Image (cartoon, rainbow, N blue to C red):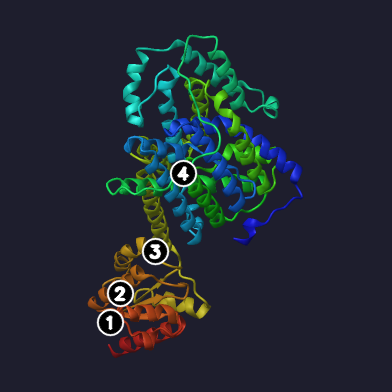
Amino acid sequence: MRAAYTFNFNHLRGDIYGGVTAGVVAIPLALAFGLASGLGPMAGMYGAIIVGFFAAWLGGTPTNVSGPTGPMVVVLAGLFASLSGNVSLILTAVVLAGLFQIVFGLIKVGDFIRLVPYPVVSGFMSGIGIIIIILQLDATVGHMAPAGTISALKYLPTALTDINLSALIVAAVTLGVVYSWPTSWGKYLPAALAALIVGTLLSLFLEPVPILGEIPSGLPEFHIPVYEQGAMMLVIEAAFILAVLGAIDSLLTSLVADNMTRTRHDSNQELIGQGVGNAVAGLFGGIAGAGATMRTVVNIRSGGHTKISGMIHSVVLAAIVLGLGPIASYIPHAALAGVLIKVGLDIIDFSYLRNAHRGPRWDLALMALVLGLTVLVDLITAVGAGVVLAALAYVRQVAKSQLDDLLSRPLTATSEEEQALLEELIDRVTVFEFGGPLSFGAAADVGHHVRERYKDDMHAIILDFRRVPFMDVSAVRAVETITCDAERAGKKIYITGMSDEIAETIVGLDADCCLNLEQSRFAERLTLLRQLRDEYNSKRQEK
């Protein structure tokens, strides 16, 4: 972790400008995410400050700006509903999530999280975007939505029968400003902040709309983690989901930062930094956070180069928090809903959806399945099912490729003499040349395909392992099946080219009952072919 403490002041001017700009961009999102989580807008600000500071200081991506994100808020909102708003238990889950992430970093889990297939990532991110939008629909018409995606959808017809026209206008205008705000103006006033200001000012001239109300400002209070036996399994499960989603979200953002800066982040160090940030945030009343793609991009484009920029972003937010409460209390729920709907739409992977029909149908089906499970069930089920199904599909594809290669590859003779012997013994000897490691998916069918290849009057089978670097248990059992079936059919089995490691594995698993490894495996294939030719000629002369 020594590198995490190193500061580079060579880009201080760019880091200051990038950090200040990212901090301004973070204000409306932190308030909106805090409100959406159920813990209140200031919990979002505290989370942005604390996670942003420690993740920048101790993380492995110099330009990452961290804070509350959509995936984390969705989990927190569900936990808030399940625990009936028990703040102490929710913050305990945030602390545990941070500890989980620290452990992930220490045991090098970051190297594996990046292996989650793209359709799975696309599906659950798009599902999260849809959830965020669903949870804000009631607020756009002036109602407070019940917690939970399904509950919010069920309440929507009721909300539509009693529309607050002023709230709808505020939400529509806010959303319109976010989309229409000129990019050149965004350098001085970010679109989300401009939309929030416009929506709030507009609400002052309309019929009353629901607003945030009194918001405490100042320093956060210290919250000691609590233990309640009846709720701890739910808390631990939510903490694990927060840790995994936060890790994935952060590392995806780190990849974006790498592409923009032409650098390479340290995945495991990033997880440690995120974990420390979340653990401390939970102790001081902040919601969980992760690497935030939009804020990171703004930071980089504004000149941020090092971790100083992310830390300055947090300092800016901390300064604002000290006097923001009285001003933020007038912000309408509908204005925040407009900002969050834009966030939800940005998370949905429209680029993949537009072109998915041109790619593999299985990937599209997997993405749709994960999306549906994310919205209708829960995130951990969606990601778990997606990863398992993607792994099984990959194993199936690899197995098919290995079997096709085994059955269709022509034998490669090493000399003219060997080629002549292969042609002479074509009806008496079958040679199987294994080309690389066999996965467990292919091993199950190898024996069947080998039996189909040799004829009833065939005298011998040669299994050539020259190109096999290693074998797992499944492949060893497949070889055992081949040799035992061949022995029962009256065939002779010869082994050539087998390494000491593979032979030790076969012997160690007691799978050599039909093999004479000591006598045959060291023989060259050409020598075996000569021997079999001589035996064949000798028997023919005897007849």
Percent coordinates x, y for residue 226 in the rendering: 37, 48
At label 1, counting other C-alpha atoms closer than 10 Å, the crowd grade (few under 14, some 14-19, many 20 or more) is: few
Q: Which residue is identified by label 4?
A: 121
Q: Are marks 2 and 3 in contact (CB under 8 Å)?
A: no
What is the secondary structure assignment of the residue under circle 2?
Answer: helix
Residue type at the position of mark 3: Ser
Question: Which residue is labeled 2 in the image?
Answer: 480
Looking at the rendered structure, the secondary structure element under dot 3 is loop
Mark sitting earlier along the chain (3/1): 3
Q: Residue at x 45, y 68 (%)?
A: 435
Which residue corresponds to mark 1?
513
Q: Do tag 4 and tag 1 residues touch (Cβ < 8 Å)?
A: no
Give the amino acid type for the residue marked by disc 2 in the picture.
Glu
Q: Which residue is mark 3?
A: 439
Q: Which one is nearer the viewer's eye here, 321 or 369?
A: 321
- Which quadrant of the view contains residue 136? top left
> In terms of sequence position, does the residue under pointer 3 or pointer 4 come before the other?
4
Mark earlier in primary sequence (2, 4): 4
Question: Which mark lies nearer to you, 2 or 3?
Answer: 3
Query: Image quadrant of residue 28?
Result: top right
Q: Secondary structure at mark 4?
A: helix
Which x, y percent locates residue 249?
50, 44
On-image quarter of the N terminus: bottom right
Furthest-left residue in this view: 488
